[in-house]
Amino acid sequence: MRTPMLLVALTLATSCTWVHMAPGASAVRVVEGPPAGCENRGEIEVSVRHNLAFYDRNQRKVRDELETLARNEAPGINADTVQPLGPPSNGSQRYAAWRCGGR
């Protein structure tokens, strides 16, 4: 009886999104390359749980959560655009932060 309950709990936990958009973060753009004419505001490093015990979480959800966290951090350093500096690795990812003046 414990094993089925554990599996149900694990399935529900891995399907949830744990990161929510902060106020102001929805205005932050995500770009693939360095934006022209923008001021570099530094780098942001974010991380989330990429696995639970022996189970790896859905990689798309992990990427989405990392992007949301980067967007949440951007307004704190006066940035309105973020650019991933590489793919996620073990639940972490680095982003360049840019101020583009509301483009």
Image (spheres, rainbow, N blue to C red):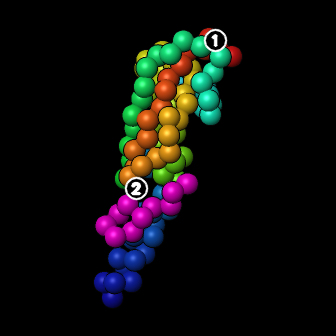
Residue at x-position 44% and y-position 35%: 94
Instruction: Choose between 93 and 18: the one closer to the eye.
Output: 93
User: What x and y, as percent, mark residue 71?
Assistant: 51, 31
Question: Does residue 3 sit above or below 33 in this rendering?
Answer: below
Visible in this render: residue 5? yes
Quadrant placement of the N terminus: bottom left
Residue at x-position 50% and y-position 61%: 58
Residue 67's tag is: none
Q: Amino acid at mark 2?
A: His
Residue at x-position 59% and y-position 13%: 38
Segment tinted magenta in the rendering: 51-60
Left or right, 35 with respect to 98, comes to right
Residue 55 falls within the magenta-colored stretch: yes
Task: Answer few, some or many: residues within 10 Å of disc 1's Cα (few below 14, many 20 plus, some between 14 and 19).
Answer: few
Q: Disc 1 versus disc 2: distance between alpha carbons?
A: 35 Å
Quadrant placement of the C terminus: top right
Left or right, 19 with respect to 31, comes to left
User: What x and y, as percent, mark residue 33?
Assistant: 62, 29
| Residue located beneath label 1 in the image | 37
Instruction: Choose between 30 and 86: the one closer to the eye.
Output: 86
Residue at x-position 60% and y-position 24%: 34
